[in-house]
Image (cartoon, rainbow, N blue to C red):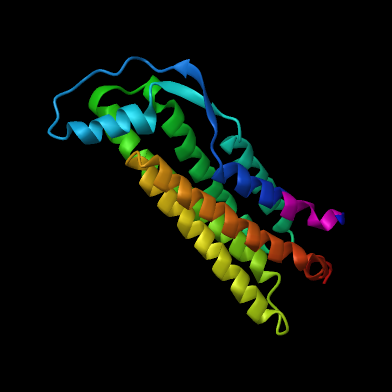
Amino acid sequence: MNKKLIPYVMLFLAVVLLAVDIRIPFREYPAFEEFATEAPQTVNLVINHVIGHQLRLDLFSDVLGYLLLAAACVMLGMKNKHFIRQLPWIAVSLGFYLCLQLMPFSLNGGMRFRAGYLLYFVSGVLQVLILLRAMLHVCDGLDTTENHSFNNLSIIFMIISCFAGMVSVLIWFFDLFWISLVYLVLQLIFLGIFWYRIWSNRKLLVGEESA
């Protein structure tokens, strides 16, 4: 494989790691302190479902995904400065993700609920958006007069994948596991189609970087 394709492979692996979550229990959070509320069902969703009662390690590590994404952006940023501009957003997204995982060790009661509610949506949506932008910048390197229509269709597949991923994140909040899983599968299918089309144009990517 051409060495110039390595950052694109890293980017693909980063997307997969960030899209797929398989978590195993690692360490118990401090016991949740109940508090008076007019929305007990929402509190239950956030505390018992979104946050849970244990820190869980992701077998498809999101932290590794963020690091691979950042490394790929640094490598690709030598020719396309748009990738470098992704780095602060990657850092912010990683920060929100880590805060969501570690916050229950320092916050409890109403503060744990409110922080978990906010961090879940901000972290999930921001993650999808930075992946969307990174993949759009990949398509920038493939946009030529001859390849314009093919490239636009690839972008459509990528946008559908990101949209399905965002819907999966939003639906999972409400503990609708199977519906969320359907959208996750759709996300991965369209993501696979997108990357297959990118890989089929890999010579053009290499030529763009050599130019």
Q: Would residue 22 be found to the left or right of residue 147 on screen? A: left
Q: Would residue 4 be found to the left or right of residue 44 on screen? A: right
Q: Residue 46 location, x and y as percent?
A: 31, 33
- Is residue 40 in view from this perspective? yes
Q: Residue 196 location, x and y as percent?
A: 70, 61
Decide: is 129 above or below 23. below
The rendered magenta stretch, by its main secondary structure, is classed as helix
| Viewer-nearest residue: 135 or 76 | 135
Numbered label tally: 0
User: Which residue range is magenta in the image?
Assistant: 3-9
The quadrant in which residue 199 appears is: bottom right
Which residue: 40% across, 20% down?
Answer: 105
Q: Residue 152 location, x and y as percent?
A: 60, 75
Q: Residue 1 location, x and y as percent?
A: 87, 54
- Is residue 85 in view from this perspective? no
Which residue: 82% across, 68% down?
Answer: 203
Which residue: 27% across, 34% down?
Answer: 114
Is residue 4 one of those drawn in magenta? Answer: yes
Which residue: 55% across, 60% down?
Answer: 133
Is residue 166 one of those drawn in magenta? Answer: no
